Amino acid sequence: MKNGWMTSGFSRLFAMSLLGGGFLVAGAAGDAAKAEYPDRPVTIIVPWGAGGGTDTIVRLFAVGFEEALGVPVNIVNRTGGNGVIGHTAIATAAPDGYTLGACTSEISYFKTMNLAPLTPESFDLISRIAEIPAGVTVKTGGRFQDLKSVVEAMKSEPAGTLTSSGSGLGGPWHLAIAGLARMENLPASTVKFVPSQGGAPALQDVMAGGIDLFTGSPVEAKSLAESGEVKVVAVMAKERLAAFPDVPTVKEAIGVDWTLSNWFSLCAPPGLPAEVKAKIVETGKKGHAAPSVQTNLKERGITPVWDGPEQFAEFANAFAGTAAILLKDLGLAK
């Protein structure tokens, strides 16, 4: 919920010596000075399909980033392999600042699931740009009216009785319900997770009664919630979402401090020159803060985030640790 330039001028310094009646252009000072970064368009690789959540978030951010950077920012979708192809393309690109990427939470557990030898350390992490908290959504008029009743069923019924969906196995929405179970001192696999191709088909299954819970983004359920077909009973965020002001957080609903969000970031191949990385961080932060970027993200129920390289790296590594624990409990760690 898965782009256009100014050319900076540069000068050459020539030193001329009269040798044997001719002129010699000195090499050391006479080499062409490097143009200041950036002097041509920048590409952001999105490892997910056009029109999806990551793609939408990055394109909204790119509007402000392009203006701050002063050159065109082009979005290229490199899909396949559950995000592996695009993320690999980012990690192996030239570290010159002209190919950046939109790393998503999958970089935290590609290696754990033996999908690819990629970890947060495989990239130069610039900053998270947005997050979308998970939630718990049920069928309106069904057996559950609030999160408390869901948790009571998790505790009283045999493991695997309740079902949830919203993503592929091991994806963020799977980790969301697995983590909630763990916080209630239950096995991570207490709720059987049924893989789906996304939120839309999972929500259809909830409405049809084939699936008990949708544990993906409440944003994907918003229109169905407004029409009264489903009910969002809790959000896995620190604070209530502006798009769902009447929906409690997990902590408010049952007193358990459990949060989980799918996150989206700006990243780069490892080894960026320090001055280039500094320029990307500076202009990225400025572009991200543009009112148009902030408004367009928030209006879609997306939480803008800018935490910078150090905090992002700390967050990503902590997320990887949590994911590894849950995936091991789920039997998905290789």
Image (spheres, rainbow, N blue to C red):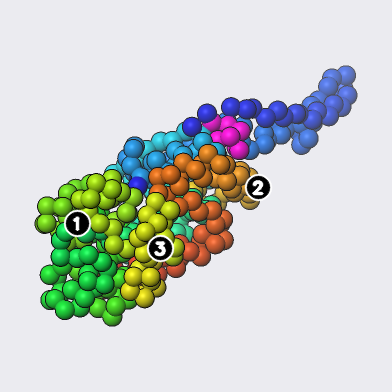
Indicate which disc, 1 or 3, sits on the residue closer to the N terminus: 1
Q: Nearer the viewer, mark 2 or mark 3?
A: 3
Magenta residues? 66-72
Q: State the residue in front, 5 or 133.
A: 133
How many numbered marks have been drawn onto this rendered protein structure?
Answer: 3
Question: For this view, does 288 lie left or right of residue 93?
Answer: right
Give the residue number, with chain letter if any, for mark 3. Answer: 237
Could you tell me if residue 264 is visible in this image?
no
Give the residue number, with chain letter if any, for mark 2. Answer: 275
Q: State the residue in front, 295 or 87.
A: 295
Residue 63 higher or lower than 234, as above or below = above
Q: Residue at x 26, y 72 (%)?
A: 148
Q: Is residue 69 a member of the stretch shown in magenta?
A: yes
Provide residue 312's location: percent of width, then percent of height.
51, 59
Please tell me in which quadrant of the rendered image residue 216 appears. Answer: bottom left
CA distance separating discs 1 and 3: 22 Å
Residue 36 higher or lower than 121, as above or below = above
Please tell me in which quadrant of the rendered image residue 105 appears. Answer: bottom left
